[in-house]
Amino acid sequence: MNSISLCELLDAVQQAIKLNFSEPIWVRAEIGEMHENGGHAFFDLIENAENSDKLLAKIRANCWASTFQMLKPYFEENTGQILREGISVLVLVTVEFHAVYGISLNIKDIDPAFTIGDMAMRRLQIIRKLQSEGIAEMNKSLEIPQRVQRLAVISSATAAGYGDFIDQLKNNERSFKFYPVLFQSVMQGEAAANSIINSLEKIYANIEHFDAVIIIRGGGASTDLACFDSYDLALNVAQFPLPIIAGIGHLRDNTIVDLVANTSLKTPTAVAEFLIDKMQDIENQLFDLINEIIDFAQNAILTQKNILEQTRWKISHLLKSVTANSVFELNRQQIRLKNAVGNIILFQKNKLDMFEKIVRTQSPQYLLSKGFSLTTFNGKRLFSIKSLQKGDTIKTYLSDGAVESTVNC
């Protein structure tokens, strides 16, 4: 049986690699793990199945300090992203093989354009997913209250941007009052998205105490903003039931959080100025209303004065226009009124006399004087014998007196 030693086998593998990969080659991969040591960078480059986390391939890669110290700033400046785990890269590599350490890649160059395209594609996919779920515009649809004073602020307590924001609010020229409450959060790096989500959950638990949520961070490298393109964070921001105002401190393209927040401004101080302007608008509206009330009152007073002057003039004019003929006519009308009243009184007196006669001739006393009599039983007028029984006592009234009788049948 023919056989070879392990060294001979690995030498053959090395020769095959040199033969087939004699020149550097561009490789697409995702950074699975990464760490730096002594200026060098060490990676695990991986490839997963499409739309799945199933690992298809994995290999070690090195980038020595002389190359890495140039590639890292070049990549981050052009992509706006930190060279980190989880991003896709296109790297120029040589294939190395060592009989003890196995196969590895030596990174010679990196193409930022590939990563930018991949990030843009992922960003677009997240935006489309939020839109398809019908939540991309939810926070934007909330109306910011006219008075925004009770503020839930998500920021790092030590961030310069947070300090600038608070100073701007406290020292505003109009002395408007604001009541910010800080929810301390990590604002960059891999832990940032979850930290901000935790703060939103705490705010939600006390939501009745706030008018709006403010998410701010100071200026810095655009590479620090990757957390604001997180789907999970964007999902929480978009669905939050209070208006969210973002001032993430960047001048480049908006993050996904900027796109789904109710209002997005470039810096923390711009957010403070926005809130102050909102209060100024309320004050202006109040002054306008006061001026309208004053104008209305002044116009009403002026109108009443004019009416009073016109009335006085009419009275004066009428008094001056009274002549002897007018006095005569007035006396004549008084005599006519007196005669008319006298006639009415006489007419009513005659009617009263007639009613008195009718009442008098229909009275019981008058009827008794004409030979009629009136019989009562138990004080009530008797109309029928059917109301009586033997032994009952009745009383009969005549014109000259009354007699009592006992019923015997």
Image (cartoon, helix red, strand yellow):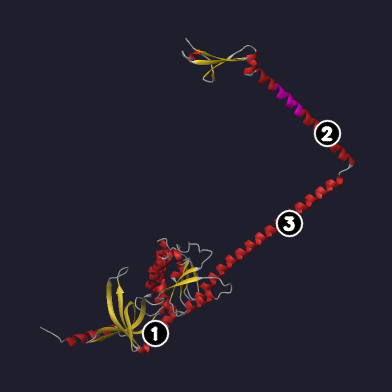
Q: Is residue 135 shown left or right of residue 46?
A: right
Depth check, mark 1 against mark 3: the one in front is: 3
Identify which amino acid the numbered label 3 is placed on: Leu
Q: Which residue is mark 1?
A: 71
Whether residue 125 can be seen here? no
Q: Residue furthest left?
A: 1
Q: Is residue 193 above or below residue 73?
A: above
Residue 292, position as x, y percentages in the image: 65, 60
| Quadrant of res 289 | bottom right
Q: Is residue 102 shown left or right of residue 342?
A: left
* Residue at left offset 58%, top offset 68%: 280
Which element carries disc 1, helix, strand or loop? helix
Per the rendered image, the range of residues in magenta is: 345-355
Q: Is residue 342 above or below residue 1?
A: above
Q: Nearer the viewer, residue 227 or 126?
A: 227
Q: Is residue 389 above or below residue 286?
A: above
Q: Which residue is mark 2?
A: 335
Mark-to-mark CA distance, 1 and 3:
81 Å
Depth check, mark 1 against mark 2: the one in front is: 2
Mark-to-mark CA distance, 3 and 2:
44 Å
Identify which amino acid the numbered label 1 is placed on: Leu
Q: How many marks?
A: 3
Disc number placed over residue 302 in the picture, else none: 3
Q: Is residue 346 magenta?
A: yes
Mark-to-mark CA distance, 1 and 2:
122 Å
Identify which amino acid the numbered label 2 is placed on: Ile
Which element carries disc 3, helix, strand or loop? helix
- Looking at marks 3 and 2 on the same chain, the residue that comes earlier in the sequence is marked by 3
